[in-house]
Every structure is written in C-alpha cells, then in structure tokens.
Image: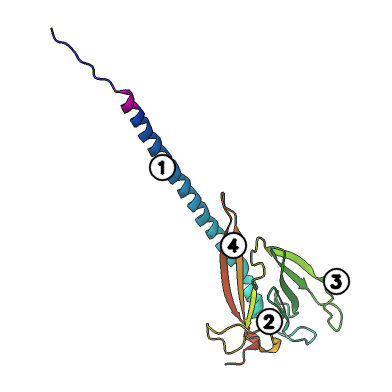
Amino acid sequence: MRRSHTQGFTLLEVILTMAIIAIVGVAIGTLQRDIYFFRTIFQGNLTVNDDARRILQPITNEIRGASPSSNGGYALEDVSPQSFTFYSDTDANGIKERIRYFLSGTNLKKGVIVPTGNPYVYASGNEQITTIIPDVANGANPIFEYYDGNYDGTTSPLSSPVPILSVRLVKITLQLSIATRNTPAHMTITTEVSLRNLKDNL
C-alpha cells in the first residue's frame, strides 16, 4: 500500500510570502503614483507652455509695432519692471491704441485706451482692462526688462529708472504657477521683442 505524503506551507513561509507580495504591491503602487505625478506635471507644463506662447504671440506683435501715438506722443509711455505702456495700431485701422500690460496681484492684465475727439485724446477713464494670464508667480522679479541698441544677447538690461528714449528691445519673462495634485510647480517663459519702428542700428 502506497502512502501519499502531502507537504504544506509552514506558518513562516506563509508570512514571508505575504510580506514579499505586500512589498511588491507597495513598490508597484508607488511607481504608478510617481508616473502619474510626473505625467501630470509634464502635461501641465506643456499646457501652460502652449497657452502662454499662444497668448504671448499677439503681445509681441503689438510691442513690435509700437509707434508714435495718434496725437503725436512718443511710442513708449511707461517702461517699468512690472508694467509696460506703449502705443500701437492693434487693429490696423490707422488709429494707435494706448496699450498697457501690467501685473496686478498674480494676474497679468492688459489695458487698452482707444483715443477719442479731435484732436485725439487718450482718456484714462476709457481704459478697458482684461486679464491676459492668471497665476503669474514673478512676485518682485521683473516681467519687463529693457535694452538699448547695443544689446547682443548677453548685455545687462538698462538700469532703473530706464531712459525711455534708449529702449530698443523688450524682454518679457513670466514665471507661471502650474497646478499639480501634490505640490505647486513653476515654469518660466521668456521672449524678446525688438521695437521695429525705433531701430537706430540699421
């Protein structure tokens, strides 16, 4: 008569197996969480980057076309670290609007004044203000930096107070907040704009 021997698991083997399964499960869960987290940041970066560049394009076009106001004033009115005011014909109707980009809290805003009357007058009470980019995290860091005609890509910006008649190029730097699941992150967008109608180095 044959005897069958059934070999079972000892309690220690069962505990070790369960511990290994738990460790592997935690490792896989952590890896999936990290992948999701970094994918969220990466996609957030792409979204913010695309949105910011799409919004910055018309801003750079307006700045590039800065020219004397419709009442004969100089093309640039205010050249400050957190605000920039200039005149430009944004709708190609022959009339120069007064354009003001400025930081208000954490929002980059745009103010537009269309001149009225004869001769033209830019009445501050007619300024239409809209929020262009929210969640700007520049704080005290400048959004706008200004350069003269000697700018070669490495030159330092003009010192404050900026001599307005020397400005030939504007550098825009935006630090943007990115909403993520676990922690805030920031992204920096930079662009440079030559003032086409003020060039003196041709």
Q: Which residue lies under the disc numbered 3?
A: 125
Question: Which residue sits furthest front?
Answer: 12
Magenta highlight range:
9-14
Residue 11, magenta (yes or no): yes
Viewer-side residue, 180 vs 128: 180
CA–CA distance in space, label 4 to label 3:
30 Å
Quarter occupied by residue 144: bottom right
Magenta highlight: main SS: helix
Q: Amino acid at mark 1?
A: Ala
Q: Amino acid at mark 2?
A: Ala
Tell me the SS state at disc 4.
helix
CA–CA distance in space, label 1 to label 3:
62 Å
Q: Which of the two marks, 4 or 1, is nearer to us in this view?
A: 1
Q: Is residue 7 left or right of residue 174?
A: left
* Nearest to N terminus: mark 3 or mark 2: 2
Which residue is rendered at x = 50% and y = 50% of the image?
37
Q: Which residue lies under the disc numbered 1?
A: 27
Labels 4 and 1 touching (C-beta < 8 A) = no
Q: Which residue lies under the disc numbered 4?
A: 51
CA–CA distance in space, label 3 to label 2:
22 Å
Tell me the SS state at disc 1.
helix
Q: Which residue lies under the disc numbered 2?
A: 66
Q: Is residue 51 left or right of residue 104?
A: left
Q: Residues within 10 Å of mark 1 (few under 14, many from 20)?
A: few
* Nearest to N terminus: mark 4 or mark 1: 1
